[in-house]
Structures are given as structure tokens and as C-alpha cells.
Amino acid sequence: MSGYDWYVYDRFVGNSLEWEFMKFIESQKNEIDKAFSHWYIIRNERMSEFAVYEI
């Protein structure tokens, strides 16, 4: 995705909530950069071990 060097994939496939999350991450990029020298966003759709569910 142009402009998002922290996003691993070439294009975005997701819903509107995920897109809002992407915009939030972009708005917080400078703060995240202060805490981490290298970081990326990877969309998890197959590894249930990393899934977060609301209980």
C-alpha cells in the first residue's frame, strides 16, 4: 500500500473496522517508532493461536 511502509502486504483486504485501525496506526506511527526500531502490521486470518476474541 503506498504510503504505509509498515504494512507488509501490497494491497489492503479487510472490512471498514480494519481500515479504521490502519488509519489509527498511521496516525500513531511516530509514537510507535519511538518505542520500536522495526515494526510491521500483518493481518492474521489463518493462525487461530494469535486470534483475539471478545468473550
Image (cartoon, rainbow, N blue to C red):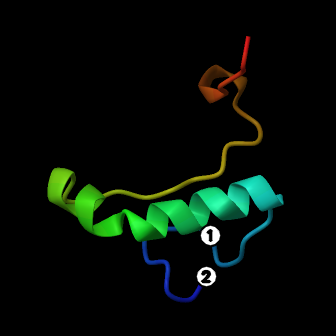
Q: CA distance from mark 2 to mark 1?
A: 7 Å
x, y percent for residue 7: 52, 68
Residue type, label 1 = Tyr
Mark 2 burial class by Cα count in 10 Å: few <14, some 14-19, many 20+: few
Query: Quick one: quadrant of the C terminus?
Result: top right
Disc 2 and disc 1 in contact, CB within 8 angstroms: yes
Residue at point 19% right, 59% down? 37
Q: Is residue 4 above or below residue 43?
A: below
Q: Is residue 32 above or below residue 5?
A: above
Image-quadrant location for residue 40: bottom left
Say which amino acid is labelled 2: Met
Pointer 2 residue? 1
Q: Residues within 10 Å of mark 1 (few under 14, many from 20)?
A: some
Residue located at (35% from left, 66% from top): 29
Position of the N terminus, as image quadrant, is bottom right
- Residue 41: x and y in percent read 51, 56
Q: How many numbered discs, if any?
A: 2
Up/down of 4 relative to 47, above or below: below
Q: Position of residue 21 (x, y in %)?
A: 61, 56
Q: Earlier in the sequence, mark 2 or mark 1?
A: 2
Mark 2, secondary structure of its residue: loop
- The kind of secondary structure element at disc 1 is loop
Tell me the residue that label 1 is attached to: 9
